[in-house]
Amino acid sequence: MTPEQFQIQLKNLSKRVQTFLKDDAPQYAANSAIEHFKDNFMKEGFFGTRWKNVKRREDPKNFKTITRGINKGTVRAINNAGKAKILTGTSNLKNSIHYRTEPGAAIVYSDTEYGKAHNEGLKAGRGKGFIMPKRQFIGNHPTLTKAIREELEKRVKQVFGS
């Protein structure tokens, strides 16, 4: 390889690294985070810390008729005492997790009004309302940091072709 060829290769590699750091890495990190946050819904907690139970599940005699479906024509009785998962009824909250990128960074968020109330334990409801128990599903955690680091290390190896 001539010095000129080496210089061209080095310049191309530098461009790939810059693109990776500015554009690709934030997207990989955000997608990994979203995957883990959505998994929190299945486990009904935040990386092993269980969410506070809801009143409807405290009484095993608590049956409720719910109506679901596009035309609300589907009616069924469910025993909410331990069978219905917390925060997963319509999956709207789980599906509200999105991200936006900025050069070198990604911001993961819920695009619903009630997402922040659930995630942080804030005032909810109309009028006087009530304080929603904190059921965090988005945020920093060592498990997430490790997963993102592993994903980015895998992707860096692809950038360098090793």
Image (cartoon, rainbow, N blue to C red):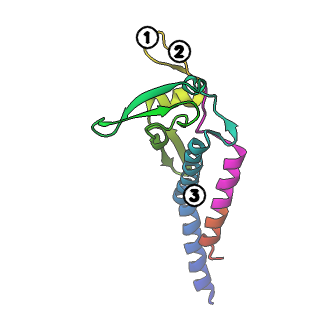
Going 70% across and 41% down the picture, which residue do you hit? Answer: 48
Q: Nearer the viewer, residue 147 or 7?
A: 147
Q: CA distance from mark 1 to mark 3?
A: 43 Å
* Sequence-earlier tag: 2 or 3: 3
* Residue 140 on image: x %, y %: 65, 41
* Sequence-earlier tag: 1 or 3: 3
**Which element is circle 2 on?**
strand
* Residue 66 on image: x %, y %: 40, 31
In the image, what residue type sits under mark 3?
Ala
Name the residue beneath numbered marker 3: 25
> Residues in magenta?
134-152
Going 67% across and 54% down the picture, which residue do you hit? Answer: 147
| On screen, residue 94 above or below 154 | above
Name the residue beneath numbered marker 1: 127
Q: Residues within 10 Å of mark 1 (few under 14, many from 20)?
A: few
Location of residue 150 (image quadrant): bottom right
Say which mark, if any, is on residue 91: none
Name the residue beneath numbered marker 2: 130
Whether tag 2 and tag 3 are in contact, CB under 8 A, the answer is no
Location of residue 137 (image quadrant): top right
